[in-house]
Image (tube, grey):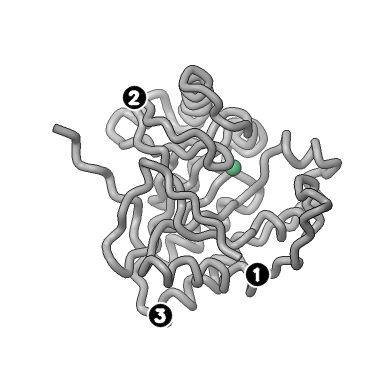
Amino acid sequence: MNDACVLSGTPALPAGGVALTYDDGPGPRSAELARLLRHERVPATFFVLGESIRRYGEVLAEVADCGHTIGLHSEYHRPFSSVPLAADQLGKCRARVEQYLGAGYFDDKPIFYRPPYGIGDEPMPGYIGPVGWHASGRDWDITYRNDAPLRPPTNPRQPQSVEGCVEDILAGLRRGDGGVVLLHDFAPTTEYTAGGLAEADLDLQAVEITVLLLQRLRAEGYQLVGLPVPAPAG
Ligand SMILES: [Zn+2]
C-alpha cells in the first residue's frame, strides 16, 4: 500500500528525479542520517518539528552543515485547521530553528513547509508549499513497532518491515517516474506519548530504510535531487 498526498505546493520533479524528505525530527539518529546522506551525495529536506527541536535542537547544526535543507513542519503535531493556526505554528517552528542556527538563518533561503499529516492545503505567505509527497511506505508503523497507537482496531494491516517500506515507496515512484518521498527521522512526542509510548519504545529505522532505498533507486536509474525552488509568480 502506498499513500500519496500531492498538495498544491508539491513541486513537479524532472522525469526520473527523486527527492527525499524526512518529517518530525530532529531525533536521536538524525545526525547519523544526515552524514550518511552527505556521504552518498544526496541532498535531502528535513521538515522539522518544534516539539522535537525542544529535545534534540542541538542536532540541527549538523544536519544543516551536511548541506541539507531545513524545512518547517509545525510547532506541535496537529493539523493546520486554519490559516491563522498555520501561520502561528510555522512562526513558532521557525523561531525554534533560529534559536539553534541563528536569527538570520532563513534570510537567504527558501522556507519550505509541510503541514502535519499533509492536512491543510493553503499557500502561506513567506513560505514555499505546502509540500506533499508522491510516495511513502508506512515507515511510521516500523517506528511504532507495528503496534501503532493511532491505528483503528477495525483496520488492521500487515506489519511493516524495512524491505516492505522500500518496496512500497518504489511502487509509488514507478507510477509517476519519480517524485517526492515521505520518510520520518523521528516521531512527535505528543503523538507517541498519547499512544502510551516512551521514546525508548520507538524503533527508529530511517537510516536502514534510506540505505536500502538508495541502493534500489540507483539500480533503477533514478536521480536523487533536492526540492526545486519554484520560479516567482508574475
Ligand atoms: Zn509529521
Label placed on residue 172: none
Q: Does residue 102 appear left or right of residue 212 in this picture?
A: left
In percent of width and height, residue 53 lies at 60, 34
Quadrant for ligand 1? top right
Residue that extends furthest to the bottom in the rendered view of this protein: 219
Q: Residue furthest right?
A: 196
The quarter of the displayed image where residue 141 is located: bottom right
Q: Please name the residue that numbered disc 2 is placed on.
A: 125
**Residue under label 1:** 162
Classify mark 3: helix, strand or loop. Answer: loop
Crowd rating for badge 2 (residues with CA inside 10 Å; few <14, some 14–19, many 20+): few
Mark 2 or mark 3, which has the lower sequence index?
2
In percent of width and height, residue 21 lies at 47, 52
SS type, badge 1: helix
Horizontal side of 134 relative to 147 (left or right) equals left
Compare marks 1 and 2 and give the one earlier in the sequence.
2
Label 2 sits on a secondary structure element that is loop
Relative to 79, residue 159 above or below: below
Residue 220 image label: 3
Q: Amino acid at mark 1?
A: Val
Quadrant holding the C terminus: top left
- Marked residue nearer the N-terminal end (1 or 3): 1
Q: Which residue is pictured at 50% across the width and 42% down the height? A: 47
- Please state which amino acid type lies under the numbered disc 3: Glu
Q: At 32% across and 69% down in the image, what residue appears?
A: 16
